[in-house]
């Protein structure tokens, strides 16, 4: 009854000459926190009151917006220091609504966790996630969020953000961040695969997964996600010193349009003839029928490096299958076989 009567008296402005601070204190004693916050002339007192659990989020945000910086920033800091989920929710809501006034960098600094898993860490993630959702074209903001997710081990969120094509980020920065990440973020290759696939950073992906001993993930990526990445992946792995047989496992079955480039990389790395032969073997007449220039491209890749005899097993196998007379691939294969017999 006292609270209801007090509300009516305040609504009617019954005591216009009353001291605001004294009235605010009375309101606080009656549990009329929203009234007390509006009446208190002291920003410090407002900061104290918004930490009360009875004060809802909207009231806290309105109060912080009213007192403005730097007092508003201090009030957010006070909420963060309270270190309860309820206070953190108010701090995050105020930061989202008032970042333009209070300053993004200053707010983010308040949320920096003192230790993994504390309320600050969750608050920082919630704040940055909301900011990125509202400003997905801000690459710097996205990178900041990715860094926070790495630190917190939020792998599923890293995967979601890097996959979302409506969210902008600097590909090289993101790739470097994910390559150097430790903990859970360094064990799950999905975010790194998303970045490298979206921005054609296939060499970076190959060397990163080689260093992590995650070539099986790379093999699944090449086979199931992006067959066209097999050529740059092959080149990068060989340059990094990966064994040719292991590289062949990663890029097999060979993507026909990429085969000449893969063959060139294998020859440049002086790979064993049997590895090259086994890799090319599945490229049979069916593939030749789909691409009139495939044989000529493979022959050019080998002959240009003075290694045409490497193709002899494949050329003989294709001839044994039967070559359609007059077809471009048939002529290229027949010509290469004759050249090998003549010079080697």
Image: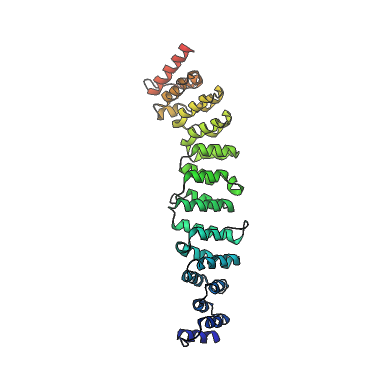
Residue depicted at 52% across the width and 75% down the height: 42
Q: Nearer the viewer, residue 103 or 29?
A: 103
Residue 160, horizontal then vertical, whole percent: 50, 51
Q: Is residue 165 above or below residue 240?
A: below
Q: Nearer the viewer, residue 282 or 257?
A: 257
Q: Is residue 44 above or below residue 184?
A: below
| The N terminus - image quarter | bottom right
Q: Is residue 219 visible?
A: no
Residue 114, horizontal then vertical, whole percent: 62, 58
Residue found at the far top of this picture: 342
Is the image coloured rainbow, by chain, by secondary structure, or in one colour? rainbow
Q: Nearer the viewer, residue 155 or 182?
A: 182
Q: Is residue 298 visible?
A: yes
Residue found at the far right of this picture: 115
For residue 273, what is the image quadrant?
top right
Residue found at the far left of this picture: 326
Residue depicted at 52% across the width and 26% down the height: 266
Residue 129, horizontal then vertical, whole percent: 50, 57
Q: Is residue 115 above or below residue 283?
A: below
For residue 335, what is the image quadrant?
top left
Q: Is residue 4 left or right of residue 116?
A: left
Residue 225, horizontal then vertical, whole percent: 49, 41
Please count the marks in the image: 0
């Amino acid at each position: 009854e006292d609270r209801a009567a007090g509300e009516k008296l305040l609504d009617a402005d019954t005591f216009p000459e009353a001291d605001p601070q004294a009235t605010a204190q009375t309101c606080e004693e009656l549990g009329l926190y929203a009234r007390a916050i509006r009446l208190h002339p002291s920003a410090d007192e407002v900061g104290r009151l918004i930490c009360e659990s009875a004060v809802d989020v909207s009231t806290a945000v309105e109060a912080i917006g009213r007192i403005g910086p730097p007092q508003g920033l201090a009030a957010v800091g006070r909420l963060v220091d309270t270190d309860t989920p309820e206070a953190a929710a108010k701090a995050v809501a105020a930061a989202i609504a008032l970042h333009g006034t209070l300053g993004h960098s200053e707010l983010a600094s308040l949320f920096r966790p003192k230790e993994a898993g504390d309320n600050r860490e969750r608050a920082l993630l919630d704040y940055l996630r909301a900011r990125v959702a509202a400003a997905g074209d801000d690459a710097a903001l996205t990178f900041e969020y990715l860094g926070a997710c790495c630190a917190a081990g939020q792998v599923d969120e890293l995967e979601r953000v890097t996959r979302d094509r409506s969210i902008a980020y600097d590909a090289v920065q993101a790739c470097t961040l994910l390559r150097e990440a430790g903990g859970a973020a360094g064990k799950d290759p999905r975010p790194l695969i998303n970045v490298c696939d979206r921005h054609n950073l296939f060499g970076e992906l190959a060397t990163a997964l080689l260093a992590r001993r995650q070539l099986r993930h790379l093999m699944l990526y090449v086979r199931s996600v992006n067959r066209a990445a097999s050529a740059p992946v092959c080149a990068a792995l060989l340059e990094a010193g990966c064994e040719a047989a292991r590289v062949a496992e990663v890029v097999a079955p060979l993507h026909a349009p990429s085969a000449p480039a893969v063959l060139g990389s294998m020859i440049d790395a002086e790979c064993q003839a049997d590895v090259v032969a086994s890799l090319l073997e599945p490229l049979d007449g069916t593939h030749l029928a789909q691409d009139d220039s495939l044989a000529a491209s493979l022959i050019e890749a080998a002959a240009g490096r003075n290694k045409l005899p490497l193709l002899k097993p494949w050329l003989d196998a294709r001839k044994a299958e039967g070559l359609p007379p007059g077809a471009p691939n048939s002529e290229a294969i027949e010509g290469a076989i004759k050249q090998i017999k003549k010079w080697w």
